[in-house]
Image: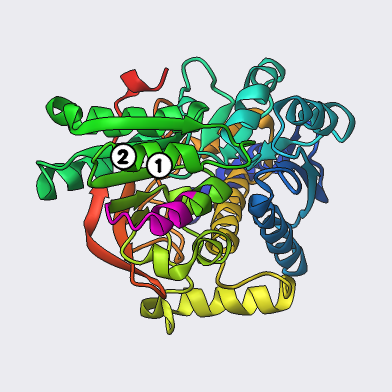
Amino acid sequence: MPGRRKNLAALAMLAAGVLVMTPALAQKKYDPGASDTEIKIGNIMPYSGPASSYGVIGKTEAAFFKMINDQGGINGRKINFISYDDAYSPPKAIEQARKLVESDEVLLIFQALGTPSNSAIMKYMNAKKVPQLFVASGGTKFGDPKNFPWTMGFQPNYQSEGRIYAKYIRDNFPNGKIAVFWQNDDAGKDQFKGLKDGLGDKASMIIADKSYEVSDPSIDSQIVALHDSGADIFFSWAAPKGSAQAIRKVGELGWKPKFFLANTATSIASVLKPAGLEYSKDIISTAYLKDPTDPTWDKDPAVIAWRAFMDKYYPDGDKANANNLYGYVQAEAMAQVLKQCGDNLTRDNVMKQAASLKNFHTKLMLPGVMVNTSPDDYFPIEQMQLMRFNGQAWELFGDVITGEVGHEHSQ
């Protein structure tokens, strides 16, 4: 009988434990924008204006959340995705962020696009303690948890990208002369800094640079001046429209430098085709996601599933436009963070979960590319692989390279 008594005692303790635990388990925590049935996510995109070719990203994300809702939502809650146009204008971005936070009462703002727009809303979002999550910009400033704990990027930051190119140039073209065309804003300055930091004692290889404004109708004079510098390596760090103009002008001049193109401007549909595929051949850039136009991935299950998603949820979307795949991957990461939040849908817990991603990898990322964050590391992805355009598609080459930026650079 003592054995039975022990069992009963154990059962009684277990029952007591269950009684104590149940209320804790059942306790749901909500901030504005979350409830038993819904999670409101805000978004700001340039659906119009000089960077409107990026607008498809917001459309893909809206389609992704529609698919998630059709599958029953996240932890039983439907996603209410509210996306506004800021025309790539910082004052308009502030207006839209206020509207999302104060009148729509979203839980967070996800994937607002562009370095200027995110810079404009950053202080406001942090003062309001509303997550500004997975910023659609590689600006290094968006990985500064000490000063801006409510703001986090996602894609590789521009300084990492600059360092990756610098490693490649130092190893392969140590005697090259570099000309740099860059966008006169935080994004362009960041990329340029990464290149210089990565070149280190070889920074004097840069013999010329010219900047441009996103609103400039033509950039021909800058490209002519860079051509005349005698450089044999050319960098274009510009938004899609500026990059397309640069590629075309370099081609028309008959200039044949080693051409490096910013990762954010590698879309065949919105950059290389308008510039002229014949002028785009042999351009080098970087990738961290699978490219839907690369025949390598034609039979890849993740790419096949993404194409099926496009057919069903975004049939007007261009499957050759890498921005549509980019938007999908960002939304997958957002869904992962919300899954990890469980029933604790507070803004504080959203940031806590975003800062505790460990070797997170979606199947549309390149093999070997992992997302890792911590409370003092807000740079989710710092690895990329080089790729070269063969006139029809991008081809990956070399190994996955890390371009980690030390935390001292994040100010």
Asked which quadrant contains residue 84, the reply is top right
Q: Is residue 126 magenta?
A: no
Q: Residue at x 42, y 42 (%)?
A: 223
Q: Residue at x 63, y 41 (%)?
A: 217
> In the image, which residues are magenta?
246-257
Task: Give, as a three-letter code, the residue at label 1.
Answer: Val
Task: Give, as a three-letter code, the residue at label 2.
Answer: Asp
253 or 63: nearer the eye?
A: 253
Q: Residue at x 51, y 37 (%)?
A: 153
Q: Position of residue 97 (x, y in %)?
A: 76, 30
Q: Is residue 242 above or below residue 244?
A: above
What is the number of the mark on residue 228?
A: 2
Q: Is residue 322 left or right of residue 225?
A: right
Q: Is residue 247 magenta?
A: yes
Kindly state the secondary structure of the residue where label 2 is placed.
helix
Q: Position of residue 26 (x, y in %)?
A: 72, 43
Q: Residue at x 24, y 32 (%)?
A: 206
Assess disc 1: are there few (<14), some (14-19) or many (≥20) residues with their C-alpha within 10 Å of its C-alpha. some
Q: Is residue 359 above or below residue 251?
A: above
36 or 257: nearer the eye?
A: 257
| Residue located beneath label 1 in the image | 224
Kindly state the secondary structure of the residue where label 1 is placed.
helix
Q: Is residue 101 left or right of residue 381?
A: right
Q: Quadrant of the C terminus?
A: top left
